[in-house]
């Protein structure tokens, strides 16, 4: 009369480690932990899922990128005891902290005066030279954070099929046992069960 198909569930579970990677602007642990929840839902590629827990000892922060900035640098140098205000005494470039700076301006200062025909004339000078250039410095722009989440993932696996055949008729009861088979194999049904009520019908017809 009827044929029922049943798929009883089976549970599949295993330990799982999920590694997450994300970007952070800061490297201090307080800022990093704000990006990492203590627990997180995960689904594996083959369909197992559950809530995994953060392993604090696996949290790692590494520099991911650098930036650079440029600023102006000005340096003054004094050149005393010069015989005259002659710019040839002054170097046009200097080295400062590994940078090459270029002469931009000179201020002269008289250090000593001498009398010439009743007039005071400067005979010793100090040159105060200003040099300028640029300095480039690098800084960290961002960090990469990696951490592991661990736990047990599971799923309900419908990998078996049960068939139940229901019979109806008069006469002796027929015990039709359920047949189990893997979902990958073909269904094997004993058709002799159907011959029992058909045989009774044929006997009754022959008697009439």
Image (tube, rainbow, N blue to C red):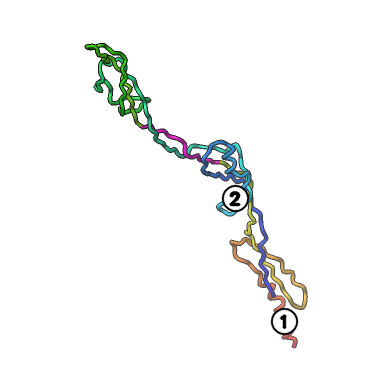
| Disc 1 to disc 2, C-alpha distance | 60 Å
Instruction: From this view, report whether residue 183 is shown above or below residue 15.
Output: below
| Callout in the foreground (1, 2) | 2
User: Which residue is more in the foreground, 9 or 178?
Assistant: 9
Q: Considering the image in quadrants, where does the N terminus appear?
A: bottom right
Q: Secondary structure at mark 1?
A: helix
Residue that carries the numbered disc 2 in the rendered image = 42
Residue that carries the numbered disc 1 in the rendered image = 201
Dot 2, how many residues are within 10 Å of its Cα: few (below 14), some (14-19), or many (20+)? some
Residue 54 image offset from top left, x and y in percent: 61, 42
Q: Does the magenta run of residues contain 149?
A: no
Residue 127 is marked as: none
Q: Residue furthest front?
A: 118
Q: Considering the image in quadrants, where does the C terminus appear?
A: bottom right
Mark sitting earlier along the chain (1/2): 2
Position of 147 with respect to 171 (left or right) is left
Position of 206 with respect to 56 (left or right) is right
Task: Report the magenta residues as a range.
Answer: 134-146
Would you identify the image quadrant in which residue 113 lies?
top left
């Amino acid at each position: 009369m009827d044929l029922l198909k049943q798929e009883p569930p089976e549970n599949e579970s295993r330990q799982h480690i999920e590694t997450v990677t994300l970007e952070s602007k800061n490297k201090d642990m307080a800022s990093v932990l704000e990006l990492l929840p203590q627990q997180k839902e995960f689904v594996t590629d083959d369909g197992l899922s559950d809530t995994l827990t953060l392993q604090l000892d696996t949290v790692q922060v590494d520099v991911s990128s650098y930036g650079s900035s440029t600023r102006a640098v000005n340096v003054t140098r004094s050149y005393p005891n010069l015989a005259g205000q002659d710019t040839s005494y002054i170097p046009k470039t200097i080295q400062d902290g590994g940078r090459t700076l270029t002469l931009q301006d000179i201020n002269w200062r008289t250090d000593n005066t001498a009398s010439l025909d009743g007039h005071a004339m400067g005979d010793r000078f100090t040159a105060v030279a200003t040099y300028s250039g640029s300095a480039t410095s690098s800084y960290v722009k961002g960090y990469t954070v990696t951490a592991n989440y661990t736990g047990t993932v599971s799923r309900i696996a419908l990998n078996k099929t049960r068939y139940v055949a229901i019979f109806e008729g008069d006469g002796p009861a027929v015990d039709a046992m359920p047949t189990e088979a893997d979902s990958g194999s073909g269904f094997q049904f004993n058709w002799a069960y159907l011959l029992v009520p058909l045989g009774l019908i044929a006997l009754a017809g022959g008697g009439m």
